[in-house]
Amino acid sequence: MTAPKPLLVVDCDEVLLHMVVPFRQWLDEEHHIHFDFNSGFAEALRHKQTGELVASPLIWQLLNSFFQTQMHRQYPIEGAAEALNLLGEQADVVILTNIGEFTTASGRTEQLRRVGIDFPVVANRGGKGRPLAGLIDQYRPSLTIFVDDLAENHASAARHASSAWRLHMVGEPELAPNIQPSPDAHARIDRWSEARRWVEEIFAKGKPFSQ
């Protein structure tokens, strides 16, 4: 009987691929909108000509349009592909990604494959705790590590998949200083060179997180 392997469940945007910087460039070039990383997201986008805030419905339209037509602008976070492929020699790896209305799991799979990341992709909307719990039920791993850039996803994971180790990572250097560490994560590491060592240390423990 084969011993169970660890399960590594990883987000995509700002963990594996840069998103907000290409999004900001596209907003500036095509829509004359300024994206201020120092502001909360609801107040971050302003029309350059008037200084007025971009209305929330338009923000979501722009995000959907970006993922529908501009995913080619995204590029890998430094060290992500190398780290994930090395960790994939020891563990099952799944990409759990929140995608918009016009994005498909197959499109994201192809996008990641082009930069050397070829693992199963699970598409989601909303909190990630329940789908994470579903993956744990499916894989029956020795332990699970969840990596994501959003605090709300770590809170969701803590509620619905409490046995998972949780790593908060914001791989975009321009954004990371403005994001507080998630209180629901077990560690905050923003570079894959350091994160890989942390993950390997958890693998070596061989046990799920216990409160």
Image: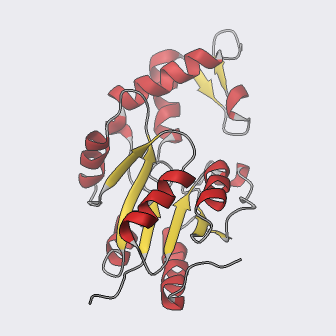
Q: Quadrant of the C terminus?
A: bottom right
Query: From this viewpoint, is residue 139 visible?
Result: yes
Residue 68's x, y, as percent? 35, 27
Q: How many marks?
A: 0
Residue drawn at point x = 37 percent, y = 69 percent: 139
Residue occupying image coordinates x 44% and y 32%: 100
Q: Position of residue 81 (x, y in %)?
A: 35, 64
Q: Relative to residue 98, is residue 139 drawn left or right?
A: left
Q: Quadrant of residue 52?
A: top right
Q: Looking at the image, is 131 positioned above or below residue 87?
A: above
Residue 17 shows in the view: no
Q: Position of residue 118 (x, y in %)?
A: 26, 60
- Horizontal relation, residue 64 to residue 71: left or right: right
Residues 67 and 48: in front is: 67
**Image colouring:** secondary structure
Q: Residue at x 45, y 66 (%)?
A: 136
Tell me the quadrant of the picture where the N terminus can be found. bottom left
Q: Nearer the viewer, residue 112 or 47?
A: 112
Residue at 32 percent across and 44 percent down: it is: 108
For residue 177, above or below residue 186: above
Relative to 49, does residue 173 appear above or below in the rendering?
Answer: below
**Relative to 204, 1 lies left or right:** left
Relative horizontal placement of residue 171, taking residue 116 as reference (left or right) = right
Find residue 9 and report its image quarter. Answer: bottom left
Q: Position of residue 137 (x, y in %)?
A: 43, 65
